[in-house]
Amino acid sequence: MAYGVLITPAAQRDADEFVGYLRGKLESEVTVARWVDGLFTAIDTLAEMPSRCPLVRERRLAAVSVRGLLYASHRIVFRHHDTTVTVLRIYQASRRALS
């Protein structure tokens, strides 16, 4: 079953902020574009079998079926319900737990 994938404004902001950070740190726009392409390719994989991803480690969020997918140094946090996957946040996996 294929799911529709939605990206919340907060998740889009997260991605945009990291792209801005990369542009400030890296001289290669090709490397930045490669990261962005990889991120959205990873997000697109959620259209098939999103439940393959584990529940997040934060118990409060796991209790409402929030899951995570790792991409490079980032965690894509999402929920799926019926026929839709909603990407809630995208943030560095090394960061403290979501609150």
Image: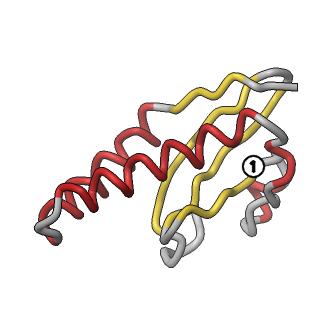
Amino acid type, label 1? Val
Q: Position of residue 71 (x, y in %)?
A: 56, 62
Q: Quadrant of the C terminus?
A: bottom right
Query: Relative to the observer, which residue lies in front, 23 or 61?
Result: 23
Query: Does 94 sit left or right of 63 as displayed?
Result: left
- Image: 36 above or below 47: below
Q: Residue at x 11, y 67 (%)?
A: 27
Query: Does 95 sit left or right of 53 as displayed?
Result: left
Query: Does 62 sit left or right of 11 as displayed?
Result: right
- Image: 97 above or below 75: below
| Number of numbered discs | 1
Q: Residue at x 70, y 40 (%)?
A: 46
Q: Position of residue 18 (x, y in %)?
A: 31, 57
* Residue at the spot of label 1: 66
Query: Relative to the observer, which residue lies in front, 37 or 19?
Result: 37
Dot 1: element: loop
Q: Colour scheme used in the picture?
A: secondary structure
Q: Residues within 10 Å of mark 1 (few under 14, many from 20)?
A: many
Q: Quadrant of the N terminus?
A: top right
Q: Residue at x 69, y 22 (%)?
A: 4
- Image: 2 above or below 17: above
Q: Position of residue 48 (x, y in %)?
A: 79, 36
Q: Residue at x 67, y 57 (%)?
A: 69
Query: Relative to the observer, which residue lies in front, 82 or 62?
Result: 82
